[in-house]
Image (cartoon, rainbow, N blue to C red):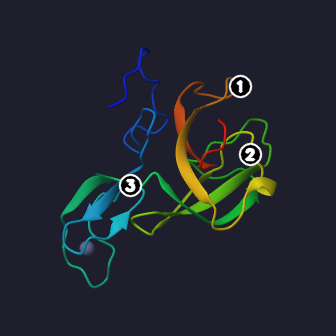
């Protein structure tokens, strides 16, 4: 675990991701067939060929390949958080490195779709909710091109 001198900020969505320098989304893994899910499932595997009901919480890959992206030009539903008043932002669909599942998320602040390319390496980062929004300072997951400056 990385050491920090300050207590970590509170997550916007507790239980959805780990905190720290190397954050990971928390998904569900079926103990029967091994399928992964995000967000976590409350009960029951969705695999129609699987009857197992044992789900465990597992940290998901924090890196992957950009599978698709778009500019969101309208207010997205929860849990996605957009600036108020609304300004368009980039949304990324990333195929997780290990699980090969697609996870949607906003693209890190300051990045536009012009900087994105299908297939590029992406990494999970946490960004605080901007000061002009509520609840300011809470951490939300975002996708950022791997190695891009914060
Ligand atoms: Zn299953």
Q: Find residue 10 and report its horizontal and vertical position in percent.
A: 45, 27
Which mark, by number, is residue 132?
1
Query: Residue 44's spot in the image, x, y percent?
Result: 26, 67
Q: CA distance from mark 2 to mark 3?
A: 23 Å
Q: Is residue 32 left or right of residue 49?
A: left
- Which residue shows up at 38% across the image and 63% down it? 37
Residue 45, image x and y in percent? 28, 70
Q: Nearer the viewer, mark 2 or mark 1?
A: 2
Callout 3: SS: loop
Position above or below: 65 against 8 = below
Mark 1 vs 3, N-terminal side: 3
Q: Secondary structure at mark 2?
A: loop
Of the 4 image quadrants, the one containing the C terminus is top right
State the mark number for residue 60.
Answer: 3
Does 90 appear above or below 43?
above
Q: Tell me, for residue 111, which label it has, or none.
A: 2
Residue ID at (68%, 67%):
118
């Amino acid at each position: 675990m990385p050491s920090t001198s300050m207590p970590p900020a509170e997550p916007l969505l507790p239980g959805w991701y780990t905190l720290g320098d190397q954050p990971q989304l928390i998904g569900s893994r079926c103990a029967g067939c091994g399928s992964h899910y995000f967000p976590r499932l409350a009960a029951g595997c969705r695999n129609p060929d699987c009857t197992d009901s044992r789900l465990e919480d597992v940290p998901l890959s924090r890196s992957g390949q950009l599978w698709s992206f778009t500019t969101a030009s309208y207010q997205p539903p929860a849990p996605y958080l957009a600036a108020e008043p609304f300004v368009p932002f980039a949304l990324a669909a990333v195929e997780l490195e290990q699980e090969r599942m697609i996870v949607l998320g906003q693209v890190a602040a300051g990045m536009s779709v012009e900087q994105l390319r299908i297939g590029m390496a992406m990494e999970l980062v946490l960004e605080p909710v901007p000061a002009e929004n509520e609840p300011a300072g809470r951490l939300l997951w975002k996708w950022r091109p791997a190695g891009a400056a914060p």
